[in-house]
Image: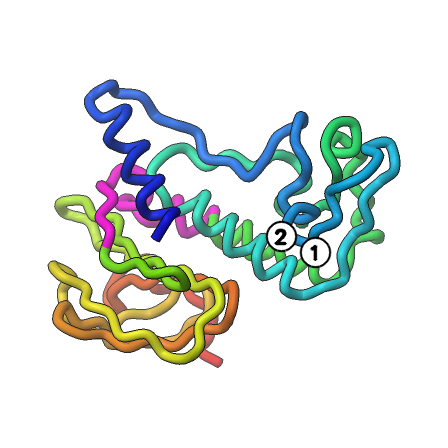
Amino acid sequence: SDLDATVQRGLDAWAGSGAVMSLLLGNHDVSRFSSVSAGDDGGDTWTPAPQSPDPSVYAKQSLALALVYTLPGAPTIYYGDEVALAGKSDPDSRRVLPAEADLSALQRQTRATARGLGAIHTCATALRRGTYRSLYSDPETWAFVRELVGADPVVIVATRNPSGSTAMAFPGIPSGSYVDLLSGRSASLQPELTILGAAPFSVALYVPTESACASLAPPAP
């Protein structure tokens, strides 16, 4: 709910300016997002933060990258964030990008997600030029839609730590069959009531199954 409110305040603040804002997780002067989420960003910044082996850190990174690619604005990736590179603030946030052979399986998986998000952003016109409309938010779940006349809508559902399935109303969303472009899972979205389950720190990008971008979805599990 706090994220939803923050995004809306920003949209209201620069409405009508013609500005295209940049979205990013971090830069060369701040601690790396992955180390903040792992709780490893404290202490002497000349002592490198460890590269976390915790899968939840990479799930959070992928969730954050998905928001960078789906919220209004120009997605910007500071080098290394595509592999959840660790780092405290300057100078550790400027460490050398690891060699390919030194990347873990979790880092490679995170990079694959970032590449997939880039392809989705290229395909879905609504993500590049569409409006933002909040559909649902509570302390654990945030759903919004990017809409553009003449283009397929993209419904984004981000989840922090659900205790079970969440029942949501999606007003104005065409009812029907949708596919999550990240997982390949199908779902029936209804404007009156949609019930979705999700894993902790996960995100889904739903488009109608007849959308041209649906071909980007991986095979359903």
- Mark 1: secondary structure: helix
In this rendering, the answer to whether 75 lies above or below 195 is above
- Mark 2: secondary structure: helix
| Residue 216 seen in this snapshot | no
Magenta residues, dominant SS class: helix
Identified at 62% across, 30% down, the residue is: 27
Q: List the single residue furthest toward the right.
A: 47
Q: Amino acid at mark 2?
A: Arg
Residue located beneath label 1 in the image: 107
* Disc assigned to residue 111: 2
Q: Amino acid at mark 1?
A: Gln
Quarter of the figure with residue 169:
bottom left
* Residue 122, magenta (yes or no): yes
Residue 152 located left or right of residue 65: left
C-alpha separation, residue under disc 2 versus residue under disc 1: 6 Å
Q: Which of 123/45 is in front? A: 45
Identified at 75% across, 48% down, the residue is: 40
